Image (spheres, rainbow, N blue to C red):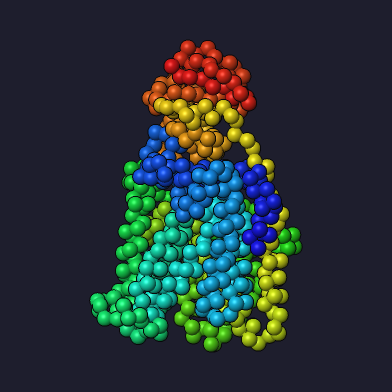
Amino acid sequence: MAVVHSWPLASDPAHLARLDNHDAELNTWIVAWVAHILPRHPLDLFEAPILYPEHHSLAFSEHMFVPSVMGAPLVWAGASPVLVYNILIMAGLALSGWSMYLLMRRWTGSESAGVIAGLIYAFNAHVLTRFVHLQAHHVEFFPMVLYAFDRVLTGRRFRDVLILAFAFVLQALCSNYLLAFTTYALLVSAIVRWPELGTRKARVPPQPADRGGNPFLGLPAGRLFLAGIIAVILLTPFLWPYYQVSRDQGLVRRVGDVAQYNATWRDYLATGGRLHYLWWSQRFYEGRTALFPGLVALGLAAAAVVSRRMIRDARVRMTIAIGAVGLAFSFGTALPGYAFLHEHLPLLSGLRNVARWGWLPLASIAILAGFGANLLERRAWRYAPIALGVLVTVEAIRAPVGFTPVYEIPRLYDRFAAASDVVVAEFPFYSGASVSLNGPYVYANTRYFKPLLNGYSSFHPDTFEARGRALNSFPSEAALAELKVAHVSHVLVHTRDFARRYGPVALDAIDTIPELQFETEEDGIRLYRLK
């Protein structure tokens, strides 16, 4: 199903991509950077070469550590960053569906309920409209978190504590957004199941090694606390650079910045699924975050919610609460009191696109739909699960997806790979509202991973913007002085883009500057050495 929903990606994963989108260029670079730096200088993970000379520049965006580590062996074996990125896309879809299948099979005892929930969870409208964001496809650890949380409450096994801690860490290291979503999903789950936190009764028999011991850990609250401590310890090396950037560079999303990303009721009617898009959803889609869960999923979820037997299940009530919190937060500043929460609740001030909280309702509907499918399976004809699987797939599918041919990185960049003391600046130098146009420069950096003044991320410090304003006058004396302060050794000028942006006179003026020594020109790119 991962191949079907991402088709035609599997037909040529080395030469198809979404590199027409600058976010995809950045995320492809991140995958390659993590694989490059880990075997060499793992402690320098966040000292990425883009946006030089800023410190902790990887913390300006998502580190995507876990998906990147999954793909690192392929990079080390010689696979291109594009091929690895595409394999990780399909792997994320497959693993997410499989993980939800395992959860619902355990919770309902039904294979078909697990399959239906897995299809709805992995191939929802939100995920299938974000192929440029690898992190959105790797949600395979969230079902494991919910499973372990339930086991910690209902059993007394220390192994479940470790599973909860490690599953939480793995999901958090896929995406900063998923760190926040999973954290608040667990908090609201603990509130819903508050009466169970202080009980010593266990529905799951404890193992001999778990009997006795610390009386505090005999309580579910104590075991949850221990899991939280383990998770915080493991996450600290990854969170500390973000704290430093927030403290030193002001990496905080202001309430005014968040307001433009609020979800509305229109987002929950937007989907890229071809059936609904062509029929009625097209009018809601443009500029929206696709969050429509599908009619079959909604019907199955409703069946679980209205069932007296199902609603008595604490896991069902917990799931409903998780979806409700995500739904409320997705409206951002339109939600009364959100501005206060944004300023005072942990993690919220680091999130910009609050509409993505709508992923939590989609995940919750997938779980509830699994419970609903279990009910229907008991009461309906035996081929109902097959029919449901077909209907869910027909609603969600948007293949063929609009991937584009991969453009080749010019060979000119290869000469930097083996060189030492290289610092590169490329022109036109984009900053401000046009900063995303640095995306091709970032993608080309996968060939050499040397310091690059240019860069693109979800956050840009004031120092970068000031540097951009100075370099906007290149080849003026002020721009050359800025390059020398940053110890730039080589300047690349993309002649067509430079002439279009600044005019042919400015392009001709570059060759009159004594400090710029012309070396070569290939593929419309001039290489100069800065004396």
- Please tell me which residue is depicted at 48% across the width and 23% down the height of the picture: 490
Locate residue 201: give its quadrant: bottom left
Q: Is residue 121 left or right of residue 184?
A: right
**Image location of residue 2, percent across then percent down:** 63, 60
**Image location of residue 523, percent across then percent down:** 63, 26
Residue 340 visible in the current orientation: no
Most extreme residue toward the front is: 77
Most extreme residue toward the left is: 214
Picture layout, residue 463 above or below residue 504? below
Picture layout, residue 441 above or below residue 7? above
**Image location of residue 94, percent across then percent down:** 59, 62
Picture layout, residue 52 above or below residue 92? above
- Please tell me which residue is depicted at 35% across the width and 47% down the height of the picture: 241
Locate residue 406: give its quadrant: top right
- Please tell me which residue is depicted at 67% across the width and 72% down the height of the picture: 389
- Please tell me which residue is depicted at 71% across the width and 63% down the height of the picture: 276
Q: Foreground residue, 32 or 375? A: 32
Disc tally is: 0
Q: Is residue 273 left or right of residue 126?
A: right
Locate residue 267: give its quadrant: bottom right
Q: Foreground residue, 8 or 347? A: 8
Q: Quadrant of the C terminus?
A: top left
Q: Is residue 387 left or right of residue 123?
A: right
Residue 89 visible in the current orientation: yes
Q: Quadrant of the N terminus?
A: bottom right
Picture layout, residue 268 above or below residue 29? below
**Image location of residue 378, percent across then percent down:** 63, 86
